[in-house]
Image: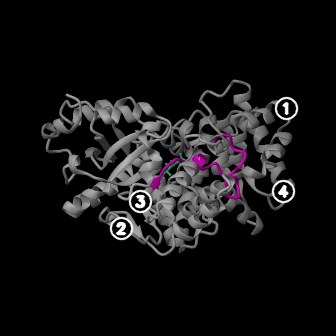
Amino acid sequence: MRLNRNALPSVPATVYMPGFDPERLQPGIVHLGCGNFHRAHQATATQAAIGREGEDGLRWGIVSATMRRPDLAICLRQQDNLYTLLTRESAGTVASIMGAICETVFAGDEQAGLVERIADPRTKIVTLTVTASGYHLTASGQLDPAAPDILTDLTAGALPRTAPGILAAGLALVRQRGQTPPVILCCDNVSHNGGTLRQAVMDFAALRGDDALAGWIGSTVQFPDTMVDRIVPVSTASDPDDARRLLGGITDEAPISAEPWFQWIIGPFDGPRPRWEAHPGTQFVADVEVFERAKLQMLNGAHMLLAYAGALADLNTVADAVCDPALGRITARFMRGEQTADVDLPASELDRYTRDLLQRFRNPGIVHEAERIGRNGSAKMAARVIRPMRSNIAAGRPVPGARLLIASWIRWFALHEQEALEISLTDPRADMLRQICASARDDHRGQVEAFLAMEDVFGPPLPDHDRQVAAIASLLRRLTDHDVRGVLHELAAV
Ligand code: CS2
């Protein structure tokens, strides 16, 4: 039997179920980016809120749009938008049936009418998880007007496919009809995600020649900042088997796995919304900044180091990389010693957060691949790595972890260019970065110089730029000429 509404009565009592009838949900939220993260994060908190609110909560069904995967939209529709969340606890796996999504659509499908749905008066909130690269921003957080997908969306009459393009079109309809705009809630790991997205949508509107729309968005539409946190890996081949076992033989073709940790910090939000705070880990605060910095730098930045350096040493998951004594030590020092720059929290809290993070990274039930985390590094570098690095250098503090991270990242492109990288490499600037490695073959300093010169990735030159270039080039040479595990071992011992 396949998971769908008819199968619900046969689900074993050991499985957590939605506290409402999913068939009765009405659409109240439009979501862009129906990936695993969304399905394990906002959908979970929304499910908890709907369950708590009784009849009134039924207006908070989610219309979730996949940006790139029409197959997932079809699969979820075949299951009445139900799927299993497998929470990988240390004591074992707990299954929950998720039912907060009332409709799944593919953003690229004209019939899905996504723009019209944003302007539907029942839509009070638009949430987004399209990843940092889905906003097409430069290192300074501005919309990149030369990004090919943005240029396509700007073509007259085009069905918008990017987040800024879809939002600008939806909000234009809202404005034209004189309606109250939905609150736009960015849930991606982008610095000042709400304010940054607001500016990107305004820039998009201005590029379309609609300055009045840009002004109206700036003055009327709310874009609260948020910090989101839950480690949600790509689904593995064993997820459907685990789901079938826990569901007593019912088949789910779209289950997801996640760690138990859940955090959602939301800035000032004025308007109707589900009572998300019913879900532990959700908090409304006056200012998200300190949470955001701690998370982006200490968690996401450390993930990048583990992914780039780890994969070079054949440590291809976060758990394998962090459990390696040398890389684990380097990462712990990087996280606590470098990535806490400008995170305004007491030392004891930083210690505790570091310990929690390292423990989460070691979770053996989570197969979090370096390949996945390594994607789109050029869009992640600025806020997660360069911001604290810049501040550390300016204060005279050492930055060995950041240098190793950058050298390892460059090494990925050098290997890729020589067709010697064993994992796939996805990055919006991949062609250009590979080209740099091809034209400066064996010239490590030249490669580092050319990478760091990309202002849209790294921003303006680093303080003490030449010395940083020389140090990163020397690491790159070591990673190229020697056994990487040996190099990590030496670096950990320093
Ligand atoms: C990861 C994140 O792929 C990445 O960039 O660092 O997806 C990370 O797992 C989440 O932000 C955790 O909340």
Residue type at numbered disc 4: His
- Which of the two residues, 229 or 391, is positioned nearer the viewer here? 229
- Which of the two residues, 190 or 328, is positioned nearer the viewer here? 190
Where disc 4 sits, the SS reads: helix
Residue hosting label 1: 439
Q: What's the CA distance linking mark 1 and mark 2?
A: 55 Å
Q: Which residues are magenta?
A: 127-149
Specify few, some or many for label 1: CA neighbours under 10 Å numbering under 14, 14-19, or 20 or more. Answer: few
Of the numbered discs 4 and 1, the one sitting upstream in the chain is 1
- Which of the two residues, 70 or 423, is positioned nearer the viewer here? 70
Of the numbered discs 4 and 3, the one sitting upstream in the chain is 3
Residue type at numbered disc 1: Ser
Residue hosting label 3: 125
Of the numbered discs 2 and 3, the one sitting upstream in the chain is 3
Where disc 3 sits, the SS reads: strand
> Residue drawn 50% across and 55% down?
173
Q: What's the CA distance linking mark 2 and mark 4?
A: 49 Å
> Residue drawn 63% across and 43% down?
156
- Specify the label residue 272 is tagged with: 2
Residue hosting label 4: 465
> Residue drawn 61% across and 27% down?
422
Q: Is the N terminus in the top left, top right, bottom left or bottom right quadrant?
A: top left
Tags 2 and 3 touching, CB below 8 Å: no
